[in-house]
Amino acid sequence: MRADARAKRDQIVTAALAQIGTRPNSEITLEGIAADADVGIATLYRHFPTRAALYDACAIVFLERIESLLDDALDGFEDNPTEHFESFVWALVESGVGILATALAADGSDGGLGARRDAFMSKVQLLIDAAAPHGIIAPGQSPMQLATELVVATRPLTAPLADILPDVRDRLVRHLMAGWRTTA
């Protein structure tokens, strides 16, 4: 792919990730993504013929970004397990975890997304396995359960709910983390 075409593709993915992370699904349009990326809708469709293709590309980029956060959480985990685990969860939340829904639903016919998701989830399992003996998370929890719960709890709200309850996402994440804990 030519450098200018690659740059436009990257602009589209960046704009889409920003919208997915901050807006309810009902407010996300391909036209809006194209406008935010400063490209025409035809350029968006040239790179991504379907919404699913765009979301798959976004999910792969998102997984690549958050894998470094996961590596940070795993590195030196035993020094401060609770801090490392919670920092990873909050970093996911702040990164706009909603695009994970696309990765979670990947079925293997998605140009590598399913394999990428599975590799990432295997590393999340390492974090869960390290956290469980410390009571941070109940044994037997799966990466898919945690990711799904985070996606559901952190979906951007529509107005007026977002205006009335601006801190609801953070409260729900704190409730989730409290619910994951055990009395080991």
Image: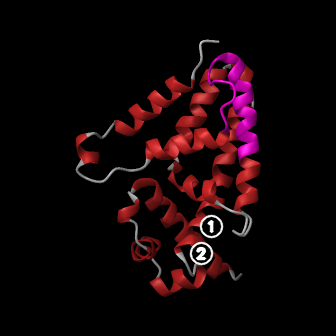
Q: Tell me which amino acid carries mark 1.
A: Ala
Q: Tell me the mark number nearer the camera, choosing from 1 and 2.
A: 1
Say what secondary structure mark 1 lies in. helix
Q: Are marks 1 and 2 in contact (CB under 8 Å)?
A: yes
Q: Tell me which amino acid carries mark 2.
A: Arg
What residue is pinned by disc 1? 57
Residue 156: tell me if it is visible: yes
Stretch of the chain drawn in magenta: 121-142
Image vertical order of residue 83 relative to residue 142, above or below: above
Residue 120 belongs to magenta span: no
Left or right: 77 with respect to 59?
right
Image vertical order of residue 61 relative to residue 123, above or below: below
Classify mark 1: residues with Cα within 10 Å, few (<14), some (14-19) or many (20+): many
Marked residue nearer the N-terminal end (1 or 2): 2
Residue 71: tell me if it is visible: no
The x and y percentages for residue 174 are 46, 28
The x and y percentages for residue 132 are 69, 23
Image vertical order of residue 169 relative to residue 177, above or below: below
Say what secondary structure mark 2 lies in. helix
Classify mark 2: residues with Cα within 10 Å, few (<14), some (14-19) or many (20+): many
Closer to the camera, 8 or 161?
161
